[in-house]
Image (tube, rainbow, N blue to C red):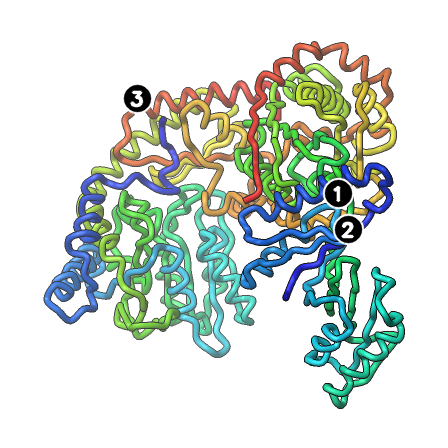
Amino acid sequence: MIYLDNAATTKMFEEAVGEYKKYACDLFYNPSAFYRQGVEVLKCINDARKSLIQKLDAGCGDIIFTSGATESNNLAVFGSKRNGNWNYIFSMGEHPSVFNAAKELERQGNKVFFVSLQENGEIDYSQLESLVDEKTRLVSVMHISNETGAVNDIKRISQIVRKKSKALIHVDGVQAFNKIEFSLKEFDIDFYTISAHKFHGPKGVGALYVKNKNNLKNIIFGGGQEENYRSGTENVAGIMAMKWANEQIDVKRNFEKTLKLKKLMESVLLKDEKVKIVKSASPYILSVSYSGVNGETLARALQDEGVLISTGSACSTKKAGNRILENMGFKKSRIVSSVRISFNAYMEEDDIKKAGEIILSCAKKLALLQV
Amino acid sequence: MKVILLRFGELYLKGNNRNVFESMLINNIKEKLQGEEYRFQKTFGRYVICDYKPNREVDIVEKLKKVFGLYSISIAEEVDATKEDIENFIKNIKIKTENFKVYVKRADKNFPISSMDFAKELGGIILENNTNKNVELYQPQTLISVDIRLNGKAYIFDEIIKCQGGLPLGSAGKALLLLSGGIDSPVAGYLMAKRGLKIEALHFHSYPYTSEQAKEKVLTLAKKLCDYVDEVKLHIVSFTKVQEEIHIRCRNEFMITIMRRIMMRIAQKICQNNELGAIVTGESLGQVASQTMQSMTVTGGVVDNLPIFRPCIAMDKEDIMEIANKIDTYQTSILPYEDCCTVFLPKNPVIKPTIEKCLKEESYLNIDELVDQAMQTEEIVVLKRD
């Protein structure tokens, strides 16, 4: 089986599983406990914070551990909401965990704007500029699109926002953290979301980077963990396994390796003139369509051939249509044909080549039936 | 003693066959109550469930509500059918509404006082113990019924819980339901089961054109039907090859018509192999192009010796949806997975096909071979009520 759905989730590092077990079975203590064992565990998760901040190259700021990206995104959106005549700006390309939070803000009576996408999948920067004003409370834009791999220019976004307002900036970095090199210091943003299972850590754990906690209010109420920003006993084992994965990954090396894989896949697929790809800067995600072939049908047929791909964000395949590709101006026929191939740095080139050829032969077969 | 009183409906009509129907009904009741502790009593015209654990009462009632052939049930107090015992119980009744009425029915005509007079007397006793309450004969908020039976017992209750009605499951035989995954077919299965048919089901999938989830959805629907029919043997047949062949060889607008004719042929085979006496579909006249009178003529035309039951034929979509909600299949049915009727869908399907035109299109196909090939893909899953 060749797994090409790494944007949905990745396989955990074996050693990260070992680390998980260590903190689930041996050092299983509650980090809020007063006795020595608890205090030791608290130190460990504080080390994990430092490890993440270092990788983010944030310099200052804090890490709030959460149950994953959906929670981190909700915390950033609702935790920065304030009463008054504020407006909130999101991109049309956001993952449902931001997009639907935005819709909820709107439903609650807040002024919410959505920035369109350009044909290349990045946001329309000039539209963003026209929308931001001194009443903008939050701008939330994803770093890398989970659908297309398009990389938004976060530095440019923060410059646009900072020039015109004091708005907070949130970036959903789920598909970027530990995948491409960047520095939060250079970005100059306020919140950054990360998720462990996208970089070979466990599911059910993630974090929100927060530059200045005074800008955030908690949305969960309880025992006051995470300095009251996220009550609930910390997922220590998950956090420590995430730390391990974080420290294991050499972002630069992985980027180069994955870029090779993506280029190889593109070169195999583009041999067939019916293939169209969306050019994008992330080496980890490739959005492809085969003219005349339904993407879902293709993905299912591939499953039988031992190749697993997706028809877009796995978190939203139950929904009809595709908001993101539509917003990029794709025709319906191309949207219906679109599939997403996503890589990890630990794959073999032979597998990529083989998978590419299987994809082509399946698509060709289905195209004969012109469905 | 608290008991559950069971009434059955149409069995009255069955004359000499009544015994057969009754023993089926009793078996079905016992089947449904498997795992419960209780005692079952049969009296003329009523069944009584007694000696059950009080904390199981709600569950037992819920199960009984899904037995076809039962008309209604009541949770009742059973007392000896003497004037004194009945009065003693009535004395302690507390009326919670503003008004009430007492209704007495005597199956035992030897009871010493007429129904009307006894009702009046009992009403008086209740009034004595419930000051500020009134008797309302026409639209009472509470109706206290006293049912004096021939077994020397009287049953006193204030609520009649409506059940499914219909005929005992299995009393009409066994049929094959074409189960697509949409809203109508589970309803059709339910309606025919209500008329006494046990149900097996047939589902066609077109993997990879249809998804695993679409198949899972059908399994869920079949499972939900088990609440009523106890068990569904689900035949799952791959229709992919057939659809591809039709798509390649036949005129596009005939896709659905030919597809349905082949489905019917496969259904008929499965009926023969499994001794099933009818085909049941969820078709509703005019709902879609394939459900016109002409379409049904040509699709039904390939079935030789079996009746095709279409219980939804005269129903509006809203009415079908209402039943789907009642039997809890609606939310599953509307999950947005394509079924095999929605892939390869022609833009303008033929609305008034004729047998001749169908035969011409089918002449481009090797029908027997396609049917056989499809039959070879048959998977069987037996689903049972939890």
Q: Position of residue B206 (x, y in %)?
A: 60, 27
**Pointer 2 and pointer 1 on the same chain:** yes
User: Which quadrant would the N terminus of chain A be assigned to in this image?
Assistant: top left
Q: Position of residue B207 (x, y in %)?
A: 56, 27
In the picture, residue B306 is in which quadrant? top right
Q: Residues within 10 Å of mark 3 (few under 14, many from 20)?
A: few
Q: Which residue is denoted by mark 3 in the rendering? A: A350
- Frontmost residue, B158 versus B325: B158
What distance separates the C-alpha of mark 3 from that of mark 2? 70 Å
Q: Position of residue A83 (x, y in %)?
A: 46, 78
In the picture, residue B342 is in which quadrant? top right
Q: Chain of mark 2?
A: B
Q: Chain of mark 3?
A: A
Which three-letter amino acid code belongs to the residue tagged 1? Glu
Q: Is A208 placed above or below B142 here? A: above
Say which label, 2 or 1, has the lower sequence index. 2
In the picture, residue B211 is in which quadrant? top right
Q: Which residue is denoted by mark 2 in the rendering? A: B8
Which type of secondary structure does the marked residue at label 1 adopt? helix
Which three-letter amino acid code belongs to the residue tagged 2? Phe
- Frontmost residue, B87 versus A135: B87
Q: Which residue is denoted by mark 1 in the rendering? A: B22
Which type of secondary structure does the marked residue at label 2 adopt? strand
At a point 66% along the width and 34% down the height, the residue shown is: B180
- Frontmost residue, B364 versus A127: B364
- Frontmost residue, A123 versus A211: A211
At a point 58% along the width and 57% down the height, the residue shown is: B59
Residue mark closest to the camera, 3 vs 1: 1
Q: Position of residue B139 (x, y in %)?
A: 85, 74
Residue B191 seen in this snapshot? yes
Q: Answer yes or no: do the residues labelled 2 and 1 have beta carbons within 8 Å?
A: yes
At a point 89% along the width and 73% down the height, the residue shown is: B116
